Image (cartoon, rainbow, N blue to C red):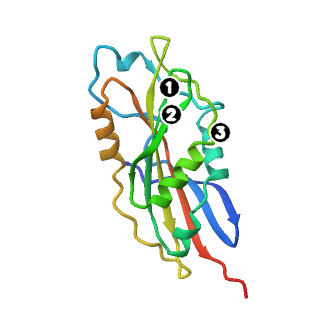
Amino acid sequence: MANSPLFISLLLLLSSGTSSLVQAQNSHPPTTQVPAPTKASVSADKITAPQYPGGENEMLKLLAMNARYPSQAQIAKKAGRAIMQVTIDEAGKLRNIKAAYTDNPLFEKEGMRVLKLMPKWEPAKNNGTPVSSTYLFPFTFKMSGSDGNEMPLPEDNTKEVSEKISADAPAQPVYLAEEVVIVGYGVSRSR
């Protein structure tokens, strides 16, 4: 986070009178492995990260094309975060999709919905042998008012959440995806 955030606009989404913009924020290197204590069964220097089919850009496209600002949150002008946790098993299937952190159940539900659309991955490997790994997906839902001012967001706790997960399961590698930012621009009213 030493560098200023680089925003990459991915897609402008229009649905049912509301609009959202999904961005990936390069606030940390993509697919960063979170440092963790290691056990003898997994050696961090022999692990290869799980791979989304087609690479990270294809993964971000999937998220951009499918992520939506929850309409109830948009109408209520709610902003917030959800850090979704996923296990990518030895076969590359996504399992145990859940919120590691959320400040609004609507954001958790949306993160879960989008992640369930993902296909099978190439699993992480330890010395060439497939192993389970944990992947974290931070989603930020920003709300921009008609006056151009953004609604305040809670403090970003992605680092603390990822360190806790890593400490809770030190034998399993933990990876952190780029932050996905979904911007809501308010509700259009028909006249």
Tell me whether the residue at label 2 lies in contact with that at label 1, contact meaning CB atoms closer than 8 angstroms. Answer: yes
Could you tell me residue 64's position as x and y percent? 63, 51
Q: Is residue 62 left or right of residue 91?
A: right
Using the image, tell me which numbered label, if any, was put on residue 58. 3
Task: Please say if 95 is above or below 190.
Answer: above
Q: Residue at x 48, y 26 (%)?
A: 49
Q: Residue at x 53, y 77 (%)?
A: 145
- On the image, numbered disc 1 is attached to which residue? 89
The alpha-carbon separation of the residues under discs 2 and 1 comes to 7 Å
Task: Please say if 85 is above or below 105.
Answer: above
Amino acid type at mark 3: Glu
Badge 3 element: helix
The alpha-carbon separation of the residues under discs 3 and 1 comes to 20 Å
- Quarter of the image where one finds residue 43: top left
Amino acid type at mark 2: Arg
Badge 2 element: strand
Could you tell me residue 54's position as x and y percent? 66, 31
Comes first in the chain, label 2 or label 1? 1
- On the image, numbered disc 2 is attached to which residue? 95
